[in-house]
Amino acid sequence: MRVLLGVTGGVAAYKAAIVLRRLKEDGHTVRVVPTAASLQFVGRATWEALSGLPATADTFDNVPAVEHVRLGQQADLVLVAPATADFLGQLAHGEARDLLGNALLATRAPVVVAPAMHTEMWEKASTQANVATLRERGITVIEPAVGRLTGPDSGPGRLPEPEDIVAAAYAVVDGGPLPPGASSVPWGDLVGLRIVISAGGTREPIDAVRFLGNRSSGHQGFALAEAARERGADVAVIAANVALPLGEGIARVDVETSAQLADAVRAAAADADVVVMAAAVADFRPREVAATKIKKDGTGALSLELVETEDVLRALVEEAVPGRTVVGFAAETGDDAASALEHARAKARRKGAHLLVFNPVGEGRGFGDVPNRVTMLDAAGDEVARGAGTKLAVAHAVLDAVVGGRH
Ligand code: CTP
């Protein structure tokens, strides 16, 4: 199941890391939503490393994905541990001060909260009234444990042990560890979307041993596939000569030539919501392919006749399947006639894809596992977004723009 784990600001926040661990060990997908105050106790990096998912605290992160609503809607269980007295008040009054408050308003899933605070705060009439209100509304408020508190004091108010919190949560949703072999459900803004990504560079045979190729390594396309999978998409990759591994759960078809790539993309794109043409597809191929190795003939030259290959991106754009987003890539260099960006704008208008991802190349930029810098253009050639950093960071920026364009 998908568990939204809310963490609010208290020293006991570190124990939520053990709760998260237990849930993950049981095979569940956990998305942590910390409050700003809780980040004073345990940082975002801990939550992201342990959950394997983004841990945003801010309502205004990832706005195109309508995260503040989606998180609550998609959760099967919301568990808040530790829950401060302030948070209980916020929840009892239906306040949406931050991402966690918004997610709780937007959820229909069972909600379990594990309060932790000093005894005086727990016993305060206002806190007890809030707890009574929450229980009346069907929210499970776990009774705090009695024992040593943060300072020298002790009494009721201690966060129960992580095992007890997990057991209380499972009791509410009739849950428990997933059976061995069962895979956890993905969680992200791309759940339910099928994405096809072409990656790498095609090779057009000249003879039995030679080909016309290009320098595309497939890193950017593969980063897109990993990012899309992480965000919950059903991902298929058409890989043209890519010597890189792909993560679990991503379908892969290996191809060599532009013709094979065109066939594979066409087949996979039939039921796709998004098609990303990140592959560097040869524009030309030798008209004839010699069955044996071509020998030098003493003339000091060799002529090859090249013919155009099918433009896969153009075909996808022309087909214009409703609801299907088509994304192209353009690696451009500037020249005397125009800058790289101007060439990209012209290409965006010519190709007509919903999004054209332009990156400047040449002088060692752009190819291989190196940081990338891209500008995303719409079909009119206007800039809609930018991305920079590692190829994974750029991949997320491209997916953000895709999601933004689909709303
Ligand atoms: N592309 C494609 N099929 C081809 C060639 C390119 O689908 N036969 C796609 C690429 O995957 C990329 C985009 O088109 O997403 C731009 O590729 P690029 O080679 O830069 O464009 P060209 O086809 O060369 O554009 P033009 O000839 O119009 O300049």
Image: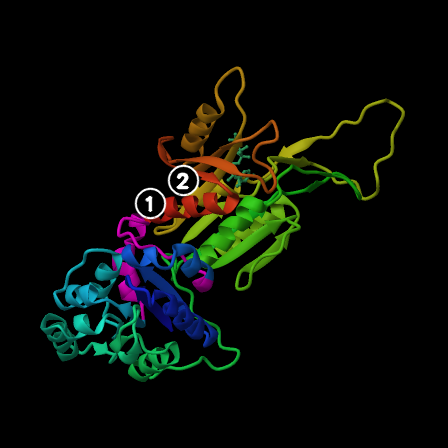
Q: Is residue 172 above or below residue 18?
A: below
Instruction: List x then y, in percent, for residue 101.
Output: 22, 61
Give the residue pinned by disc 1. 405
Q: Nearer the viewer, residue 202 or 223?
A: 223
Instruction: List x then y, in percent, for residue 77.
Output: 31, 73
Q: Residue at x 38, y 41 (%)?
A: 354
> How many marks are shown on the rendered structure?
2
Q: Toward which corner of the image does residue 253 lie, by quadrant?
A: bottom right
Quadrant housing the N terminus = bottom left
Residue 254 magenta-highlighted: no
Horizontal side, residue 150 vs residue 309: left or right: left
Instruction: List x then y, in percent, for residue 143.
Output: 24, 80
The secondary element bearing badge 2 is classed as: strand
Horizontal side, residue 182 vs residue 155: left or right: right
Do the residues under discs 2 and 1 have CB atoms within 8 angstroms?
yes
The amino acid marked with disc number 1 is Gly
The yes-or-no answer for disc 2 within 8 Å of ligand 1 is: no
Tell me how far mark 2 sits from mark 1, CA to CA.
9 Å
Horizontal side, residue 363 vs residue 95: left or right: right
Q: Residue at x 15, y 75 (%)?
A: 123
Q: Nearer the viewer, residue 237 or 362?
A: 362
Horizontal side, residue 91 vs residue 320: left or right: left
The amino acid marked with disc number 2 is Leu
Residue density around tag 2, few if under 14, some if 14–19, many if 20 or more, within 10 Å? many
Instruction: List x then y, in percent, for residue 80.
Output: 28, 69
First in residue order: circle 2 vs circle 1: 2
Give the residue pinned by disc 2. 355
Q: Bounds of the magenta span?
A: 50-75
